[in-house]
Image (cartoon, rainbow, N blue to C red):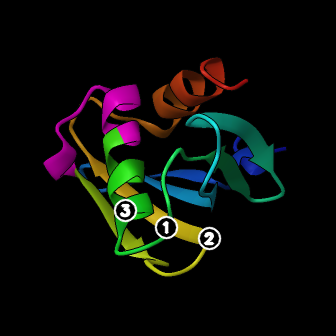
Amino acid sequence: MNQKAGAAWCSDVAGGVRLALQVTPNAKKSQIIGPLENVLKLRLQAQPIEGKANDALVRYLAELLDVPRSKIVITHGHTNKRKIVEAHAPSLTAEAVMRRLLASAQ
């Protein structure tokens, strides 16, 4: 069985990784909840108005993955709770990102 089958939310792409996320805004604090079906569920301490939650998501992921904010791009789902995000840095692999994000899960 493919060891990545359970981690459909994180995959390698050229120059980085792609993440499938389900974001819940208006949380008491920003935190990763954990994998749910084929997405990584997380909460953001930001309002879903005027792009504030998207900005908070980019900042939060950049901090967790230790990459500049300019390297985090929301490619799909700007106005949806389900988003596809790409993080571009040579040091990022799906395996390393999964380990890092899951280690910070609550």
Residue in view at x 62 percent, y 70 percent: 82
- Please report whichever mark, 3 or 1, sits nearer to the chain's N-terminal start: 3
In front: label 2 or label 1: 2
Label 2 – label 1 distance at C-alpha: 7 Å
- Please report whichever mark, 3 or 2, sits nearer to the chain's N-terminal start: 3
Label 3 – label 1 distance at C-alpha: 17 Å
Secondary structure under badge 3? helix
Residue in view at x 43 percent, y 77 percent: 78
Kindly identify which numbered label has been placed on residue 82. Answer: 2
Please say if the residues under marks 2 and 1 sit with CB atoms less than 8 Å apart: no
Residue 3 falls inside the magenta stretch: no
Instruction: Return the residue nearer the eye: 96 or 29.
Output: 29
101 sits to left or right of 4: left
Q: Position of residue 97 (x, y in %)?
A: 48, 32
Instruction: Please state which amino acid type lies under the numbered disc 3.
Output: Lys
Whether residue 3 appears in this view of the structure is: no
Q: Which residues are magenta?
A: 60-71
Q: Position of residue 26 (x, y in %)?
A: 61, 54
Secondary structure under badge 1? strand
Residue 68 falls inside the magenta stretch: yes
Secondary structure under badge 2? strand
Instruction: Please state which amino acid type lies under the numbered disc 2.
Output: Arg
In front: label 3 or label 2: 3
